Amino acid sequence: MKNIFDPKETELVIDRINKLSPTTRPIWGKMSSDQMLAHCNVTYEMAFEDKHKKPNGFTKFMLKLFVKNTVVGDKPYKRNSRTAPQFLITNARNFVEEKARLTDYLKKAQNLGEDYFDGMESHSFGKLTKKEWNTMFYKHLDHHLNQFGV
C-alpha cells in the first residue's frame, strides 16, 4: 500500500484528482465526478469534523467485526461494492468546491503526519494504527480515482 502521508504520494494523488473534470465519466458505477469527490470527502469529514452521527455501541461492534478488515486491510475493494449510508451522495455537488475540499483534506492529513493518526479513534472502528489509517485513506481514494480512469 502506498503511503498517503508521504508528501510525494500525496502530490501524486492530488495530480490524479486534478485530471478530473466535471464531465469525467466513471468506468463503472453510477456516481458523477462531483458526487465521487463528495463521497471521498466523507472519510476525511469523519476524521476531522463532527458532522456525521457516530454509531452506537452495538453498531460500532458490528462494524469492527464485519467491515473494519475490508476497509483497513490490503485487499482492494470490489467494483460496485455497497457503501455505508453516510457515504451515499445522491444529489449533484459543486465539483470545484468538492475537489478543493478533498485536496485540502489530503494536505492536512499529510501535514499532520502518520504519527498524529497512530492510535487515533476512528469514527466507526475504534482506535486504528497509522498503517490502518493510511490504508483506509489511500485505498478508498485509489479505488475511486481508478473508477474514473485517473
Image (tube, rainbow, N blue to C red):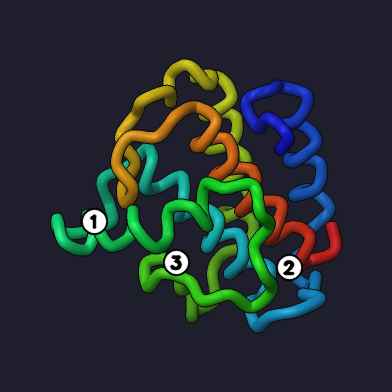
User: How far is disc 1 from disc 3 in space, using C-alphas?
Assistant: 19 Å
Frontmost of labels 1 and 3 is: 1
Sequence-wise, the earlier of marks 1 and 2 is 2
Task: Look at mark 3 in the image and give the residue it sits on.
Answer: 87
Identify the amino acid type marked 3: Phe
Are dots 1 and 2 in contact, CB under 8 Å? no
Task: Look at mark 1 in the image and give the residue it sits on.
Answer: 61
* Crowding near the residue tagged with mark 1, few <14, some 14–19, many ≥20 C-alpha atoms within 10 Å: some
Residue 56, position as x, y percentages in the image: 15, 59
Sequence-wise, the earlier of marks 1 and 3 is 1
| Secondary structure under the numbered disc 1 in the rendered image | helix
Task: Look at mark 2 in the image and give the residue it sits on.
Answer: 22
User: How far is disc 3 from disc 2 in space, using C-alphas?
Assistant: 19 Å
Q: Is residue 13 above or below residue 7?
A: below
Q: Residue at x 76, y 67 (%)?
A: 147
User: How far is disc 1 from disc 2 in space, using C-alphas?
Assistant: 38 Å
Q: Residue at x 49, y 79 (%)?
A: 91
Task: Describe residue 98's horizontal placement relative to residue 126 as left or right.
Answer: right
Q: Quick one: quadrant of the N terminus?
A: top right
Residue 16, position as x, y percentages in the image: 80, 47
Front-most of residues 66 and 133: 66
Task: Describe residue 28's horizontal placement relative to residue 60 as left or right.
Answer: right
Q: Residue at x 69, y 61 (%)?
A: 144
Identify the amino acid type marked 1: Phe
Q: Quadrant of residue 6?
A: top right
